[in-house]
Image (spheres, grey):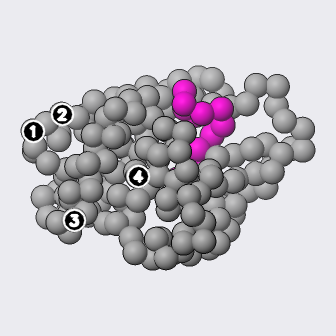
């Protein structure tokens, strides 16, 4: 991704975050399925996942999304993705294995996972497929490493990480 394309994507993320803030401020709750429909609920999740420039907003929305999930207004998978995103931002191990990063020599890799022996059970509880299947899909989606030689300046998707992130 070129610097101009990255800047444009980051600006789009900031605008989308601002729009979601206004919507949630107007609604007073997470834009759940019965209120805005399945697609709009997923769009709100995607926006907040891409709000890496505002981790405080992501943590606030994590609470709102959890409440929506508990009321059946959002999916467990939506909540799990944001839960992991917030944990990774805070330098902690993720619980559901939804967050990945791209390393030029080895390709797509999951961020560290808390208690990996219970990972698939946790994923099943929130409606996610087994982790090995998700890793395979991510690797197919993002392809093989571009080169065995790392770039001089790694591409940065977020100001909070030295590498690109991909959500499962």
The residue where tag 1 is placed is: 26
The residue where tag 3 is placed is: 70
Q: CA distance from mark 3 to mark 2?
A: 23 Å
Could you tell which of marks 3 and 2 lies nearer the N-terminus? Answer: 2
Q: Is residue 156 above or below residue 75?
A: above
Query: What is the magenta range?
Result: 157-168
The spot of residue 27 in percent (x, y) is 10, 44
Packing grade of label 2 (10 A; few <14, some 14-19, many >=20) is: few
Marks 3 and 2: which is nearer the front? 3
Q: Secondary structure at mark 1?
A: helix
Could you tell which of marks 1 and 4 lies nearer the N-terminus? Answer: 1
Q: Is residue 138 left or right of residue 37?
A: right
Q: Quadrant of the N terminus?
A: top right
Q: Are marks 1 and 2 in contact (CB under 8 Å)?
A: yes
- Number of the label disc, if any, that sits on residue 22: 2
Residue in the foreground of this view, choosing between 14 and 72: 72
**Visible in this render: residue 123?**
yes
Could you tell which of marks 4 and 2 lies nearer the N-terminus? Answer: 2
Q: CA distance from mark 4 to mark 2?
A: 22 Å
The residue where tag 4 is placed is: 83
What residue is at 90 percent from the left and 38 percent from the top? 149
């Amino acid at each position: 991704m070129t610097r101009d394309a990255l800047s444009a994507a980051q600006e789009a993320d900031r605008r989308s975050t601002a729009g979601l803030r206004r919507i949630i401020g107007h609604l007073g709750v997470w834009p759940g399925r019965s209120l805005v429909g399945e697609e709009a609920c997923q769009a709100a999740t995607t926006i907040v996942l891409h709000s890496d420039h505002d981790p405080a907003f992501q943590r606030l929305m994590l609470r709102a999304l959890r409440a929506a999930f508990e009321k059946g207004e959002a999916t467990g998978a939506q909540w799990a993705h944001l839960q992991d995103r917030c944990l990774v931002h805070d330098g902690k191990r993720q619980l559901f294995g939804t967050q990945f990063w791209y390393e030029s020599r080895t390709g797509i890799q999951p961020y560290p996972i808390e208690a990996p022996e219970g990972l698939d059970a946790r994923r099943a509880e929130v409606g996610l497929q087994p982790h090995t299947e998700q890793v395979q899909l991510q690797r197919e989606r993002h392809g093989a490493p571009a080169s065995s030689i790392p770039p001089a300046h790694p591409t940065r998707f977020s100001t909070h990480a030295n590498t690109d992130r991909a959500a499962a």
